[in-house]
């Protein structure tokens, strides 16, 4: 859930993690959408409070984005299921936000119902070597809790500023590891509302890809995920976590609003083995600015909102980067971030 965001299912590139900050969710045509009436019905039926025209920038790591028509927080899996079923049954456009990384929300905001996923129940069993996490659990928390249990395999999660749901949706990875290497199964809410368990094989996991990313709307919603881990010394795992922290502090623009790695690494045969960040750097684009957004001098695959920019600033900068890299190297960079909300009328510069 994208920690990132989903619209019905709930997302370090060059060694930096791609935040599954969010998962895109189920959208459907709502003939008429009255946020006041819908919010009142949600409160009455589900006991979940809602707000209208809620500014969304503060719920994302890029710190951009306009208002949600209607906004709610799911504090547990029960509320998450209820809100999803409610919206789907009424044809209300639904967007699920995780930790808000890996997404750029339009300045015009998001139509319909936006739900922030705070379903964060987590069970770790040192005896069985397993961990089961609801989709709103932050990946960094999953990494530290499994370390405390003496289980290795999820250390890379410390470098992913998204949630479990978004990480599954994007098959997020970092530091030469990814979700697919430890995931065993997921609990999924399909459009028909009947929750099912899916094995890893059914998810069609690829490089920053999964069946969820490939779906047309409405999508399946990740409720929880289970992982198989290996026993190891808690001290050894802690040392690996410390190494990841130091690497991030050295190589990434921490503390400055960003969505994480902006572009996917291109196929090696097309790029000569160069990462997206290396191509952007070699194109001389570090420090390039559009409005309040710029290419980070520290890591070229991070576009940062360092001067209170807008979503349009960020996207125009991304378009510029794609065009210049394509003109210089003949490589077309693909977005890792997801553009959520009302981008109607947006025309990308040709690349």
Image (cartoon, helix red, strand yellow):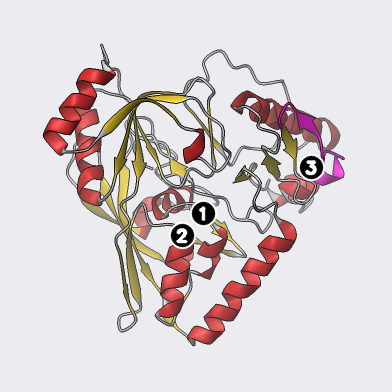
Residue in the foreground of this view, choosing between 91 and 294:
294
Residue in the foreground of this view, choosing between 290 and 346:
290
Q: Earlier in the sequence, mark 3 or mark 2?
A: 2
Q: Earlier in the sequence, mark 1 or mark 3?
A: 1
Q: Which residues are magenta?
A: 280-292
Magenta stretch: residue 205 in it? no
According to the image, label 2 marks what residue? Answer: 139
Q: Quadrant of the C terminus?
A: top right
Residue 172: mark in rendering: 1
Q: Is residue 277 above or below residue 34?
A: below
Residue under the image location 49 percent in, 25 percent down: 66
Residue in the foreground of this view, choosing between 77 and 168:
77
Side (left or right) of 94 relative to 13: left
Q: Nearer the viewer, mark 3 or mark 2?
A: 2
Please state the horizontal and vertical placement of residue 127, each as a whole percent of the image: 30, 84
Q: Is residue 258 above or below residue 252?
A: above
* Corner quadrant of residue 46: top left
Side (left or right) of 54 relative to 11: left
According to the image, label 3 marks what residue? Answer: 280
Disc 1/disc 3 C-alpha distance (Å): 21 Å
């Amino acid at each position: 859930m994208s920690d990132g965001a989903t619209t019905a299912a709930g997302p370090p590139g060059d060694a930096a993690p791609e935040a599954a900050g969010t998962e895109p969710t189920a959208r459907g045509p709502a003939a008429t959408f009255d946020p006041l009436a819908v919010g009142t019905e949600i409160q009455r039926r589900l006991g979940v409070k809602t707000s209208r025209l809620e500014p969304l920038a503060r719920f994302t790591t890029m710190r951009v984005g306009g208002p949600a028509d209607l906004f709610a927080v799911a504090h547990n899996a029960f509320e998450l299921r209820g809100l999803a079923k409610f919206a789907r049954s009424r044809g209300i456009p639904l967007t699920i936000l995780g930790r808000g990384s890996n997404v750029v929300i339009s300045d015009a905001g998001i139509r319909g119902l936006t739900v922030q996923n705070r379903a964060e129940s987590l069970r770790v069993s040192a005896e069985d070597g397993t961990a089961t996490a609801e989709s709103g659990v932050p990946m960094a928390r999953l990494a530290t809790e499994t370390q405390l249990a003496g289980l290795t395999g999820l250390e890379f999660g410390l470098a992913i500023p998204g949630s479990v749901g978004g990480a599954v949706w994007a098959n997020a990875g970092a530091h030469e590891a990814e979700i697919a290497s430890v995931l065993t199964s997921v609990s999924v809410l399909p459009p028909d509302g009947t929750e099912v368990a899916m094995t890893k094989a059914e998810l069609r996991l690829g490089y920053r890809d999964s069946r969820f990313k490939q779906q047309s709307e409405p999508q399946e919603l990740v409720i929880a995920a289970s992982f198989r881990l290996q026993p190891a010394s808690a001290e050894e795992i802690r040392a690996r976590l410390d190494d990841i922290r130091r690497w991030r502090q050295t190589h990434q623009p921490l503390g400055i609003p960003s969505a994480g790695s902006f572009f996917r690494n291109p196929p090696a045969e097309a790029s000569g083995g160069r990462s997206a960040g290396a191509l952007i750097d070699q194109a001389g684009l570090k420090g390039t600015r559009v409005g309040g957004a710029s290419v980070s001098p520290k890591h070229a695959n991070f576009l940062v909102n360092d001067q209170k920019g807008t979503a349009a600033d960020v996207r125009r900068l991304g378009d510029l980067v794609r065009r210049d890299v394509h003109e210089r190297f003949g490589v077309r960079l693909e977005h890792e971030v997801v553009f959520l909300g009302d981008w109607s009328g947006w025309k990308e510069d040709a690349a």
